[in-house]
Image (cartoon, rainbow, N blue to C red):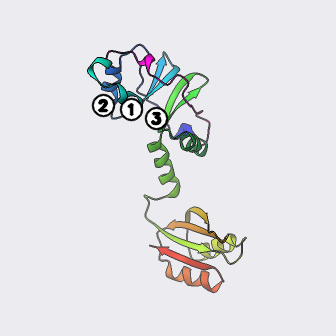
């Protein structure tokens, strides 16, 4: 999944010569927490709600955006993967990334957009069932998937976590289906079913 498919393309932006009062007005009007600072289409800075919050006294609102903006913000390419963008946001503890091609602003990606991508990828809003399985051997996931298909199951997504013991638990989200017969077949085949969510 690429950033370009999840970014906001119609970006509310501000000029470095605008006032902090104007920035505050835009953030309130559009319910946003990030403002790319541009000259024409060229990204020159980034203004966040947390930075602006320090300057909301009436005497500060006439100051210029250029005085407090982040001058070299962390950015991402529209061709980057969602995973790369998520790592940047996590590593730098930030809430959003300007999306640029060269120096030209083409979008913005926020934590909310990442969450939407994750929810879509995991199929969390679709009617679904989930079965959590530890395969009988380390390479046994394919056998689990074969049994799922044999019982008419259609996989939406697969997540995996490692137990402290080194065992892998696979969280397999399926299109909505009854799970009891599938769980029994998995157990008979030597796989361990940890939980069912219907």
10 Å crowding of disc 3: few (<14), some (14-19), many (20+):
some
Q: Nearer the viewer, mark 1 or mark 3?
A: 1
10 Å crowding of disc 1: few (<14), some (14-19), many (20+):
some
Tell which of 16 and 129 is nearer to you: 16
Label annotation for residue 150? none
* Residue at 54% from the left image edge and 31% from the top image edge: 99
Q: CA distance from mark 2 to mark 3?
A: 18 Å
Q: Where is residue 6? Give x, y as percent.
A: 50, 41
- In the current view of this chain or complex, which residue is farthest to the top? 17
Q: Where is residue 95? Give x, y as percent.
A: 47, 39
Q: Is 135 rendered above or below residue 97?
A: below
* CB contact under 8 Å: marks 1 and 3: no
Q: Say which label, 2 or 1, has the lower sequence index.
A: 2
Tell which of 75 and 164 is nearer to you: 164
- In the current view of this chain or complex, which residue is farthest to the bottom? 188
Q: CA distance from mark 1 to mark 3?
A: 18 Å
Identify the magenta region.
Answer: 61-81
Q: Is 73 rendered above or below residue 119?
A: above
Q: Secondary structure at mark 2?
A: helix
For label 3, the residue is 8
Q: Nearer the viewer, mark 2 or mark 3?
A: 2
For label 1, the residue is 49
Q: For residue 32, say whether it is visible.
A: yes
Q: Secondary structure at mark 3?
A: loop
Label annotation for residue 28? 2
Q: For residue 2, say whether it is visible.
A: no
Q: Where is residue 137? Give x, y as percent.
A: 71, 76
Q: Is 37 rendered above or below residue 92?
A: above
Q: How many marks?
A: 3
Quadrant of the image for the C terminus? Answer: bottom left
* CB contact under 8 Å: marks 2 and 3: no
Q: Secondary structure at mark 1?
A: helix
């Amino acid at each position: 999944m690429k950033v370009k498919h999840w970014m906001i393309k119609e970006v509310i932006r501000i000029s470095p010569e605008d006032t902090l009062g104007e920035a505050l007005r835009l953030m309130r009007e559009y319910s946003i927490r990030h403002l790319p600072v541009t000259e024409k289409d060229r990204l020159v800075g980034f203004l966040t709600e947390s930075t602006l919050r320090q300057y909301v006294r009436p005497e500060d609102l006439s100051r210029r955006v250029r005085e407090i903006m982040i001058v070299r913000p962390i950015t991402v390419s529209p061709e980057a993967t969602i995973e790369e963008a998520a790592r940047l946001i996590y590593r730098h503890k930030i809430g959003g990334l300007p999306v640029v091609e060269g120096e030209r602003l083409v979008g913005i990606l926020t934590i909310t957009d990442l969450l939407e991508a994750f929810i879509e990828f995991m199929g969390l809003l679709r009617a679904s069932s989930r079965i959590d399985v530890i395969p009988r051997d380390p390479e046994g996931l394919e056998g689990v998937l074969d049994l799922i298909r044999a019982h008419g199951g259609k996989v939406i997504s697969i997540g995996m976590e490692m137990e402290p013991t080194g065992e892998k638990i696979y969280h397999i989200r399926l299109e909505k289906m009854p799970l009891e017969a599938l769980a029994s077949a998995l157990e008979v085949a030597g796989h361990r079913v940890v939980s069912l969510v219907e």
